[in-house]
C-alpha cells in the first residue's frame, strides 16, 4: 500500500517536472502538447495584463483585425532570425496577410505571442507576425550567412570616362613611347543627348548591384561623375584591388547612324604588354558580348582584337572593354537609356561573367 502511494507520488512529481520543461522548450519545438500547456499558463497569468493592450488599441491605433486572430500571449523574449534570405513580416499569422517589412538573417525580434506556427512580434509598438520555423534562440553563425551570399569572386568595374576628358597624355602601355590622351571625352547620344560617361555610370551601378546579388565582391573605379583618373591609372587601381577580372563599360560611336550592335575589345596574343593573358581576355570578352546580345537581342558584333588601348595595355588581370551599343544610332541610344533594357544588359553581362568563372 505504502509502496503504491510512493510510486503515485513519484509519478505526480515527474509530471510537474516534465510540464515545466515543456514550457521552457515551447518555442524551439512547438509540439501540440506544449502548445496546450502554454494556453493554460498564459490564460492564468495573461488576463489582467492583456487589458491595457486592448484599451490602447481601441483608443488609438485602428488595429481592428488583431482580436480576430487566435493568439496566445507569451512572456516577451528575444529570438534570432535564422532564415537564409529575407524573412517576411506580416500583419497577420498567414501568408495571405500583407507583408510590411522583411528581416535579415541574424536580426533579433521580440516575440510576445504564438498563433499556430506563427510568432507574434512587436516592432515600433505594433504587432506583426513571422513564421516560427525561421526563429531560433541561438544566434546564427556569421560564417553561414557569408557562405550563402559570397561566391568568392571579385570583379572590378570601370564606368568609362567621367564628366570631362583629360587632354594631358600618358604612355599607352608600360614603358611605351606612344602617348595618348589620359581620358577621352566619350561619345554623345544622338536621341537622348546624354554623355557616354553618364550612361556608362548608370549601367555600371546596375551591374554592380546585379553582381553583388549573385555573390560577387565588386570594386568600383567610380560611382560619381567626378573621377579624374586616367585610363592607365584605372587599370593600375584594378590590378591592385584584388579583383580577378576588369570590366570596362563603354558605349560606341560612328559617323554612320545606321551602325548598331555590341562588341567587346580584347588584346591579341602578340600584344607586348598583355599577350600572356590575351586568351583569357578574349574568352571573357566573347562570353560577355554573347551574354549581352542574348539578353537584349542586340546585334552581336563579336569580339575585336586591339593592341593600342591604354585601358587594356596597363592591365595585369583579364580585361574586357564592353561597347554596349552605338549612341550614334537613335534606336540603340534610346534603348540603352531605358531602365528595362539596362537591366537586360547587366543581366547579360553578368551571365557572361558567371560563364567565365564557371
Ligand atoms: Zn568610351
Image (cartoon, helix red, strand yellow):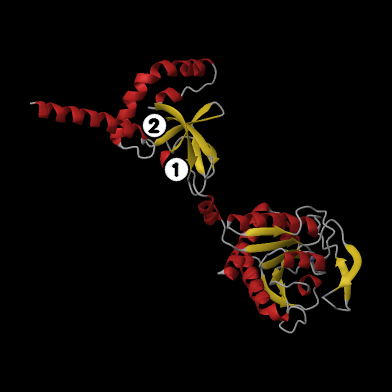
- Residue for point 41% across, 27% down: 74
Residue beneath label 2, please?
A: 115
Specify whether tag 1 is near ligand 1 (CB below 8 Å).
Answer: no
Outermost residue on the front side: it is 2
Residue 184 seen in the figure: yes
Q: Secondary structure at mark 1?
A: helix
260 relative to 178, above or below: above
Q: Sequence order check: which comes first, mark 2 or mark 1? A: 2
The label number, if any, that marks residue 157 in the structure image: none
Asked if residue 150 lies left or right of residue 225, the reply is left
Where's residue 173, x and y in %? 82, 75
- Residue for point 87% across, 58% down: 164
Residue beneath label 1, please?
A: 134
Dividing the image into four quarters, tell me where ligand 1 lies: bottom right
Residue 99 seen in the figure: no
**Which corner quadrant holds the C terminus?**
bottom right
Judge the density around disc 1: few (<14), some (14-19), many (≥20) Cα neighbours within 10 Å: some
- Residue for point 80% across, 73% down: 309
Where's residue 17, x and y in %? 28, 31
Asked if residue 52 lies left or right of residue 21, the reply is right
Q: Secondary structure at mark 2?
A: strand
Where's residue 154, x and y in %? 64, 63
Distance Cα–Cα, label 2 vs label 1: 15 Å
Asked if residue 100 lies left or right of residue 257, the reply is left
Q: Quadrant of residue 25?
A: top left
Where's residue 193, x and y in %? 81, 55
Q: Quadrant of residue 298?
A: bottom right
Specify whether tag 2 is near ligand 1 (CB below 8 Å).
Answer: no
Amino acid at each position: 500500500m505504502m509502496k503504491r502511494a510512493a510510486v503515485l507520488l513519484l509519478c505526480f512529481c515527474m509530471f510537474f517536472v516534465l510540464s515545466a520543461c515543456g514550457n521552457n522548450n515551447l518555442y524551439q519545438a512547438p509540439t501540440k502538447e506544449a502548445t496546450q500547456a502554454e494556453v493554460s499558463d498564459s490564460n492564468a497569468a495573461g488576463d489582467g495584463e492583456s487589458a491595457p493592450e486592448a484599451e490602447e488599441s481601441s483608443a488609438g491605433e485602428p488595429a481592428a483585425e488583431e482580436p480576430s486572430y487566435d493568439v496566445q500571449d507569451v512572456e516577451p523574449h528575444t529570438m534570432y532570425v535564422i532564415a537564409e534570405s529575407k524573412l517576411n513580416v506580416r500583419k497577420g499569422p498567414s501568408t495571405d496577410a500583407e507583408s510590411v517589412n522583411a528581416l535579415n538573417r541574424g536580426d533579433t525580434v521580440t516575440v510576445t505571442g504564438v498563433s499556430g506556427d506563427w510568432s507574434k512580434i512587436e516592432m515600433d509598438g505594433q504587432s506583426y507576425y513571422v513564421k516560427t520555423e525561421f526563429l531560433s534562440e541561438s544566434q546564427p553563425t556569421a560564417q553561414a550567412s557569408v557562405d550563402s551570399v559570397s561566391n568568392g569572386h571579385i570583379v572590378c568595374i570601370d564606368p568609362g570616362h567621367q564628366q570631362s576628358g583629360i587632354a594631358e597624355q600618358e604612355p599607352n602601355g608600360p614603358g611605351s613611347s606612344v602617348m595618348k590622351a589620359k581620358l577621352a571625352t566619350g561619345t554623345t547620344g544622338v536621341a537622348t543627348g546624354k554623355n557616354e560617361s553618364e550612361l556608362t555610370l548608370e549601367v555600371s551601378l546596375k551591374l554592380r548591384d546585379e553582381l553583388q546579388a549573385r555573390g560577387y565582391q565588386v570594386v568600383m573605379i567610380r560611382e560619381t561623375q567626378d573621377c579624374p583618373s586616367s585610363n592607365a591609372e584605372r587599370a593600375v587601381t584594378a590590378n591592385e584591388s584584388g579583383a580577378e577580372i576588369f570590366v570596362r563599360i563603354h558605349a560606341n560611336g560612328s559617323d554612320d547612324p545606321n551602325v548598331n550592335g555590341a562588341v567587346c575589345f580584347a588584346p591579341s596574343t602578340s600584344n607586348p604588354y598583355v599577350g600572356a593573358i590575351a586568351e583569357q581576355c578574349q574568352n571573357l570578352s566573347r562570353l560577355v558580348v554573347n551574354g549581352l546580345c542574348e539578353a537584349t537581342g542586340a546585334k552581336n558584333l563579336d569580339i575585336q582584337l586591339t593592341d593600342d588601348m591604354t585601358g587594356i595595355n596597363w592591365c595585369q588581370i583579364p580585361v574586357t572593354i564592353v561597347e554596349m551599343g552605338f549612341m550614334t544610332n537613335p534606336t540603340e541610344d534610346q534603348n540603352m537609356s531605358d531602365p528595362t533594357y539596362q537591366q537586360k544588359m547587366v543581366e547579360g553581362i553578368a551571365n557572361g561573367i558567371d560563364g567565365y568563372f564557371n
